[in-house]
Image (spheres, helix red, strand yellow):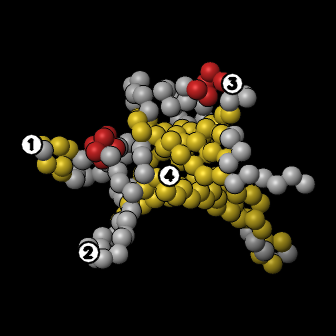
């Protein structure tokens, strides 16, 4: 059995789902967690006076993503999280529900790459911890809870992925427009 190459990710971008916006770099991502959000569908038939619960399936409630990032660019704070900039002051406002796509690349040590796009995302305000300066070096990261929904803007899918072998032109332009 061949051993699989280890992988990591790179080239995180976001793209607003309104208009014809191009993807914007989201540098500094260091971890991405993914968890399907499935709820059991339970029925309770009462057969001969003995109610019994049966799980008959699962309701798909989207995908929970947890993105840990070193710093959020000002463009993301303004365009996605609803901050405003006034006289050079960044102002946090009530959080709007802005839809965006999250794009990134899984890169393998053997040189292969897969590019991905979660097509319809919304996120909560970032979570973070701050620490005082000390003699040791610490990076205070931000954590974004992102909900990936089915793409209501077109494809009705959660995520699209591509390799260079599937379509080299689309692969090469993945971070220049949303497919």
Q: Which residue is identified by label 2?
A: 132
Assess disc 1: are there few (<14), some (14-19) or many (≥20) residues with their C-alpha within 10 Å of its C-alpha: few
Extreme-front residue of the structure: 135
Q: Which residue is located at x 30 percent, y 77 percent?
A: 135
- Circles 3, 1 touching at the beta carbon (< 8 Å): no
Q: Is residue 22 above or below residue 2?
A: above
Assess disc 4: are there few (<14), some (14-19) or many (≥20) residues with their C-alpha within 10 Å of its C-alpha: many
* Mark 1 or 4: the one toward you: 1
Assess disc 3: are there few (<14), some (14-19) or many (≥20) residues with their C-alpha within 10 Å of its C-alpha: few
Pointer 4 or 3: first along the chain: 4
* Mark 4 or 3: the one toward you: 3
In this view, the residue in front, 136 or 128, is 136
Instruction: Say which element carries label 2.
Output: loop
Hey, which quadrant is residue 85 in on the image?
top left
- Marks 3 and 1 sit apart, C-alpha to C-alpha, by 46 Å
Query: Image check: 96 left or right of 55?
Result: left
């Amino acid at each position: 059995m061949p051993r699989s190459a280890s992988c990591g990710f790179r080239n995180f971008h976001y793209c607003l789902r309104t208009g014809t916006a191009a993807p914007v770099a989201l540098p500094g991502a260091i971890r991405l967690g993914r968890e399907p959000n499935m709820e059991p569908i339970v029925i309770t038939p009462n057969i001969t006076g003995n109610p019994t619960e049966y799980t008959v399936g699962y309701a798909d409630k989207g995908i929970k993503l947890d993105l840990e990032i070193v710093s959020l660019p000002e463009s993301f704070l303004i365009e996605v999280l609803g901050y405003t900039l006034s006289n050079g002051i960044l102002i946090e406002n009530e959080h709007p529900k802005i839809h965006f796509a999250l794009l990134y690349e899984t890169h393998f040590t053997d040189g292969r790459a897969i590019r991905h796009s979660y097509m319809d995302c919304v996120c909560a305000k970032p979570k973070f911890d701050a620490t005082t300066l000390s003699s040791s070096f610490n990076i205070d990261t931000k954590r974004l809870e992102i909900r990936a929904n089915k793409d209501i803007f077109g494809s009705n899918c959660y995520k699209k992925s591509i390799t260079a072998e599937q379509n080299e032109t689309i692969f090469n332009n993945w971070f220049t427009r949303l497919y």
